[in-house]
Structures are given as structure tokens and as C-alpha cells.
Image (cartoon, rainbow, N blue to C red):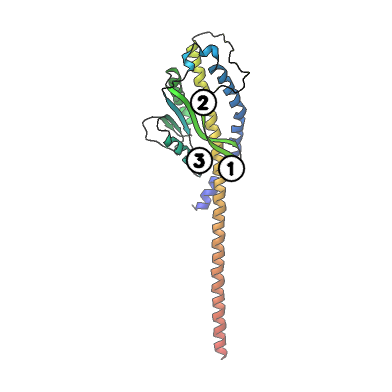
Amino acid sequence: MKIESVVKVMNFHALLRVDSSRKQAEKFFEYEKELNEFADNILNNRNLALDKKVLKTNPKGKPLNIYIANDLGFCGNFNSNVNEVMKKDKDSQKIIIGKKIKSEEKNVLLTISKEEYKERQKEIEDILYDSVKNNKNSEINIIYNHYYNISEMQLVKKKILPIEKAKDKRKLYQEDFIIEGDINHILINIITLYLSYEIKIAQDNSYASENVMRQTITKQSLDKLKEIKEEKTKEQRKITKQKNFKKTLENYTNNMLKEK
């Protein structure tokens, strides 16, 4: 199959996915704000933080970083930027989502492809649950290419635990809670669920960035292939024209010699 045909197929597939993935990412913008607000009200609440060590992170622990890359080609520096950050993070525990980046480091807890994410999400949740329950990590971050809009995407490192307090000084975090059951167990599960949803949202957001990049780059590649093709056509026409001119000149010279 010709390269141009392959690129056309990739461009077509990316184009089909761009709109749906963009809508999916944008749908989560407001949802993410609400999720963050919900977790903030619990994790930074004074009444809970005074008594429950589960709300604390371990300042002596290593960071836990979740790196989200992609599974497909034609994404420019999509993966290289994520991979560059990962290489510099020598002292962190790692979860890698996306088969285009790999690490042989011992502190990689899990490596899965984006395609496997849905089926293996429970494995990620188990790692998060263990981190929260046993107070293992100093912080938890997600590193991924964030989709803002169709023309703006940026590599970000988003801290999802601990949650920084809101800048609004009117927020005092003094709400009280009536709780039935084992509070530690409830809080661990709430925090794990929050972290899991944050990763899910980032994964979907990253997918939108991935498809926008693929569509842009494959279109640029097609334009370049078209340009090369046109240059070859021009060159071929030039060669043909020169041959025809040479043939005409030879015919004219031969005719002149005959007349003499």
C-alpha cells in the first residue's frame, strides 16, 4: 500500500474521532470542577483532618505519578514530552498508561495500554487504595497532554492529592458531618474513588488531544505528500518538454540538412 493511502486512512480515522473525543473532554470540564470541589470539602475539612490520619499524605513517601501517553503513531511530540518528564522523575513511583512509552525502572508499579485501560482500571484503583490506606505517598500527580480547545493543548502535571485549599478566603472548611459506620473505611473509599475519576477524566481529555494532534499531523503530511507529488509532476513535465524540444530540434536540423 502506498504511503499516501496509509496516511489518508489515518487522517480519516482521526477526523472521525476528533469531534466525539472533543465533546467527551468538554463534557467533563464542569464535572471535573464539581469533583474537585467535592474532594476539597472533605480532604481539607478541619473537623475530619484533626482526627483522621487517612486524610494526610506522607511527607517522607515518594510521589506517585500517573503518566498518560497514547497507543498510536502520528502524534508528533505527544509521547516524547511525557517520556521526557518521566525520565526526569527518578524518585517517583509510576503508573504508565499508553504503550508508546516504556520504562525499565523498578519503581514502575503498572504499565498498560490505553486500549486496556477500561478492563484494567481495577488494578489502578487497587494501587490508589493501597497508597491512601497505608499512607505511602507524599503526593499523587497525573502527567498528560491536556486538551483546552481545538487549537490549544499543553503538557500538564496535575496534582490530585493532596488538594490545595481554595483561594477563596470565605471558605472555612468547618462543615460538620454525621457519619455512620467505619469512618476510616468510608474516607479511604471516597478518596480512592475521587482519584480514580480524576485519572479517568484525564485519560479521556488526553484522548481528545491525541486525536486533534493526529488529525493535524496527518493533514500536514498529506499536504506535504501532495506538494512532493506536484513537484515530481512539474519535473516530469520539464523533462518531457526538454525531450520534445530536443526531438523537434533534431527533426529541424535533419530537414535542413536534407534541403542542402
The amino acid sitting under disc 1 is: Leu
- Looking at the image, is mark 1 or mark 3 nearer the viewer? 3
Q: Residues within 10 Å of mark 2 (few under 14, many from 20)?
A: some
Residue 154 is situated, as x and y percent measured from the top left of the image, at 55, 37
- Which residue is tagged 1? 15
Q: Residue furthest right?
A: 170
Look at the image and tell me whether residue 13 can be seen: no
C-alpha distance separating marks 2 and 3: 22 Å
As measured in the structure, the alpha-carbon distance from the residue carrying label 2 to the one carrying label 1 is: 32 Å
Q: Is residue 221 above or below residue 155?
A: below
- Mark 3 crowd level (few <14, some 14–19, many ≥20, 10 Å Cα): many
Label 1 to label 3, Cα distance in Å?
Answer: 17 Å
Q: Which is more toward the observer, 165 or 38?
A: 165
Q: Element under label 1?
A: helix
Among numbered discs 2 and 3, the one appearing first in the sequence:
3
Residue denoted by label 2: 160
Point out which mark residue 30 bears.
none
Residue found at the far front of this picture: 169
Amino acid marked by disc 2:
Ile
Residue found at x 50% / y 15%: 187
Residue found at the far bottom of this picture: 260
The reply to whether dot 2 and dot 1 touch (C-beta < 8 Å) is no
